Amino acid sequence: MSITVNVYHHFPVGADIVTSLNEIKELIMATEAEITGLLTAATAQLQKIAAESAATLQKVTDLETIIASMGTNVSPELEAAVAALKAQVQLVDDLVPDALPADPVV
């Protein structure tokens, strides 16, 4: 990113004004560096959440497979617990928008 500062003046520019402008530019750039750090940290956190979510979804799938293999020997309480878990998984899934498909390479 490039920052351009145009100063239009009708008086002689002293060194103090140039110094002030350079200080402002340094503050802006420091802020940009801080924002970059925050964005990097947020991206890492989202990647962690994605990995944890994928692991949880796999556990739910594994649990459904085990329960399905039990046939009719499943209690209504277990069925209700699995339904509640699936509803919670769906609730979390609905909080995060699905990724858009990548643009095709032309």
Image (cartoon, rainbow, N blue to C red):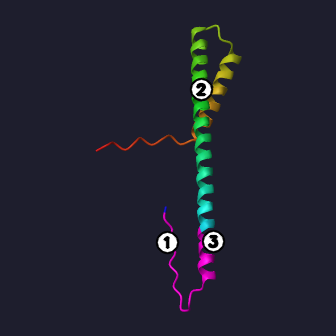
Nearer to the camera, 96 or 74 = 96
Q: Quadrant of residue 94?
A: top right
Q: Are marks 3 and 2 in contact (CB under 8 Å)?
A: no
Residue 23 numbered mark, or none: 3
* As drawn, 80 above or below 68: below
Dot 3 or dot 2: first in sequence order is 3
Q: Quadrant of residue 104?
A: top left
Question: Which contiguous range is marked in magenta?
Answer: 2-25
Dot 1 or dot 2: first in sequence order is 1
Q: Is residue 97 located in the magenta-colored stretch of the structure?
A: no
Task: Estimate how packed mark 3 is, as few (under 14), some (14 to 19) or many (20 or more) residues with alpha carbons within 10 Å.
Answer: few
Tag 3: amino acid? Glu
Q: Secondary structure at mark 1?
A: loop
Tag 1: amino acid? Thr
Q: Residue at x 65, y 11 (%)?
A: 74
Nearer to the camera, 82 or 16 = 16
Q: Residue at x 32, y 43 (%)?
A: 105
Residue on which the image places disc 1: 4
* As drawn, 15 above or below 43: below
